Amino acid sequence: MKLLIWTFLLFTNITIAQSNEKFPSESITKKLTELSDKNSIVGFSVAIVNRDSILYAKGFGYSDKEKKTLYTKNTVQPIASISKTLAGVALMKAQEMGKLNLDDDINEYLPFKIINPYFPNSKITIRNLATHSSGLQDSRNYSKTMIVKDFCSLPKKTRKFLSNNWCRKCEDNKDIPMIDFIKNIYSLQGDWYKKKHFLKNPSGTAYKYTNNNTTIAAYIIEQATGEKYNDFIKNNIINPLQMTNSNWVFEESPSDNVSSLYANDISLPEMQDITYPDGSFVTNVVDFGNYLSSMINGYSGNNNILNSDSYEEMMTQQIDGEFESGIFWEVYSKWIGHSGEHAGTSTYAYFDKENLVGYILFGNTTDTKNLQEEELEIIRVLKKYSTE
C-alpha cells in the first residue's frame, strides 16, 4: 500500500504551474536524470499531459540493466492496478450501450450466487464493486492468481523471493478460468470459501479496496455484452484511441521494446495473472498519455470514447465523500487517477481537477528500501514543471 504517496496526494498544497512560455523540457530532463542516477529504480518513464495532448514524455535508466538497454518513452510494461481505470471506462460504455446498469444486482450476471453471509438480504451491485463498497475482501488465496512460467527452473533466490513476497507457494498455482477463481473464494460451493472473505458491513456502507471486485466486474461486462473483456477493451478503448503499443500480458507483445521487471535487485520471470483485469494491462507512457488526455478531456465536459455524462458519473465521488472513489477511479479533493504496484511494477497516473493537467510515472522496480521516497521525488518534479 502506497500510504506515503496517497498522503502526499491528499494533503499536498503544490499547485500545478501555469505558463504560456515554452514547456521546460530540458529542465525536467536534467532534474529527472539526476534523480535516476542516484535512486534504486532500474528504469522508469514519465509523461505530463493536458486535455489536448502530451506535453512531455521521456524514459530514464534501463529497461534491461544486464543488457544496458535504455528505458524510453516507448518502452512497454505492465501497469498494475492502474488497469482498473479501464474497467471503469468499460462499465460506463456498457451502460451507455444499454447492456447493464451500475445499480444492477451482480447475481443477475453470475453463474453462482455471491451473498455476504453476515447480510444475506443485502444486494451487492455493480456500483458497489466499482467503488470498493461490495463487502468483499481479498483473501490469502489471492496469491494463487499469479502464474509464474517455469517457476521450478528459476534460481533459488528468485523462487524464495517470490514465494515470500508475492505468491506464497507459486509452484502450486494452476491456471483456471477467472470466474472459477472467483467462485472458489466467494461461493458457498467454492473450494476456498470462508466467511472471513466478507466484511461485517452491508454493501454500500464500508470502503475496502479489493482486487477481485474488478475481476467480477470484468466478467459481468463479458456476460452483458457477449464479448471477452480483453476484446471489449480493445474495441472500445485501445482501437478508438489508437493505443497501438498496448494490450494484456497474456497476449503477444505489440512491441519489441518490453521492459524487464525487477524486485529488490532480482530480475523477475515472465508472469501472468488469472485475474488479469485488475492489473495486467501492458502499455507505455505515450499510449497511456493519450488515454489520460482523453480522460481529462472527457472530465472537462467533452464527448469522446464516452459521453460527458458518463465521465461525470465515473469521476464523481460515489456513495459519500468518505469513499474517495468514483467508478474504479480514485477521486480526491484535488486529484483524480490511480496508482498500482505488483511484482516489479510501480505506477502512478493522476490529473489535477482544477487545472486539468496530469502526470504519469511507470517504473520497472519494486521492493527496494527507499522506493516510495524516490518515487515521491519524481512526482514532485512532475508537479512542479507541469503546465498547460
Image (tube, grey):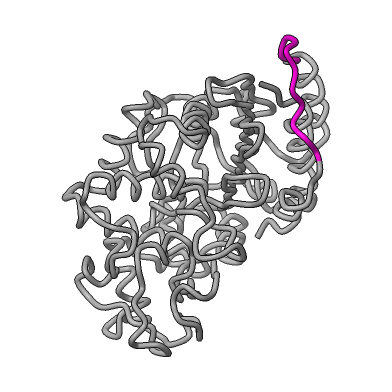
Name the residue located 31 percent from the left edge and 44 percent from the top edge: 93
Residue at 37% over, 81% down:
192
Q: Position of residue 149 (x, y in %)?
A: 41, 51
Drawn side of residue 379 relative to residue 230, left or right: right
Q: How many marks?
A: 0
Q: Is residue 65 visible?
A: no
Q: Residue 326 location, x and y as percent?
A: 50, 54
81 relative position to 247: left or right: right
Give residue 276's position: percent from left, percent from top.
39, 52
Q: Is 23 one of the magenta-colored residues?
A: yes
Q: Which residues are magenta?
A: 14-24
> Looking at the rendering, in which quadrant would you find the C terminus?
top right
> Residue at horizontal 61%, vertical 32%?
356
Which of 268 and 41 lies nearest the eye of the viewer?
A: 41
Q: Nearer the viewer, residue 266 or 85?
A: 85
User: For this view, does 384 lie left or right of residue 51?
Assistant: right
Tell which of 366 and 94 is nearer to you: 94
Q: Position of residue 11 (x, y in %)?
A: 78, 52
- Please tell me whether residue 146 is drawn above or below residue 364 in the rendered image: below
**Res 145 → quadrant:** bottom left
Is residue 347 inside the magenta stretch?
no
The quarter of the picture where the N terminus appears is bottom right
Q: Residue at x 30, y 85 (%)?
A: 188
Q: Is residue 260 left or right of residue 9?
A: left
Query: Is 68 rendered above or below residue 375?
Result: above
Residue 48 visible to an observer of this rendering: yes
Residue 202, quarter of the rendered image: bottom left
